[in-house]
Image (cartoon, grey):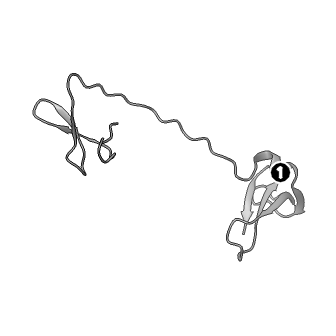
C-alpha cells in the first residue's frame, strides 16, 4: 500500500498501456512504477475473542438457585446479575446449569 505524499490518501493502481502507476483520487499526485511489480498477499489472523463475563472464574464465585435448565431439566443453576443495558432497565441474570454446564440469560 502506498499513500499520497500531499494529501495522505491511499493510492490506487492504474494500468497504462504497458506500465502501471499509482494515482491519488483526490489530488493530481501520481507515482510511476518502474521495473517489475511484485504482489504480496498477507494473511490476517483472527482476533482472540475476550470472554466479557469473566470465563470459568466468574462461575466459581457465583451463587446457586433453584431454576430449571432448558437443556437437561436439572433443578439447580449458578447465577449472577449484571447491568448490560441502560441504568433505567432491569439487570440481566446469567445462569449456568450445575449438571450439564449449559448457559442462558434472562433479561
Q: In which quadrant is the N terminus drawn?
A: top left
Decide: is 44 above or below 27: above
Please give the residue where the numbered disc 1 appears in the rendered image: 59
- At mark 1, the secondary structure is helix
Q: Residue at x 85, y 52 (%)?
A: 98
- The residue closer to the viewer here, 80 or 68, is 80
Q: In which quadrant is the C terminus drawn?
A: bottom right
Q: Residue furthest front?
A: 6
Image spot of residue 90 (x, y percent):
74, 74
Image spot of residue 52 (x, y percent):
70, 52
What is the total number of numbered labels drawn onto the structure image? 1
Q: Residue furthest bottom?
A: 88
Is 43 placed left or right of 9 in the picture? right
Is 86 placed left or right of 38 in the picture? right
Q: Residue at x 29, y 45 (%)?
A: 6
Is 105 placed left or right of 11 in the picture? right
Image spot of residue 100 (x, y percent):
80, 49
Q: Residue furthest left?
A: 17
- The residue closer to the viewer here, 98 or 34, is 34
Quadrant location of residue 23? Answer: top left
Amino acid at each position: 500500500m502506498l499513500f499520497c505524499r500531499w494529501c495522505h490518501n491511499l493510492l490506487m493502481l492504474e494500468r497504462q498501456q504497458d506500465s502501471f502507476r499509482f494515482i491519488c483520487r483526490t489530488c493530481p499526485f501520481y507515482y510511476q512504477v518502474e521495473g517489475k511489480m511484485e504482489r504480496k498477499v498477507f494473511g490476517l489472523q483472527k482476533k482472540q475473542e475476550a470472554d466479557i463475563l469473566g470465563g470459568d472464574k466468574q462461575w466459581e464465585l457465583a451463587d446457586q438457585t433453584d431454576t430449571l435448565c432448558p437443556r437437561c431439566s436439572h433443578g439447580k443453576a449458578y447465577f449472577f446479575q449484571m447491568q448490560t443495558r441502560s441504568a433505567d432497565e432491569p439487570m440481566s441474570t446469567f445462569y449456568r446449569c450445575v449438571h450439564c454446564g449449559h448457559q442462558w440469560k434472562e433479561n
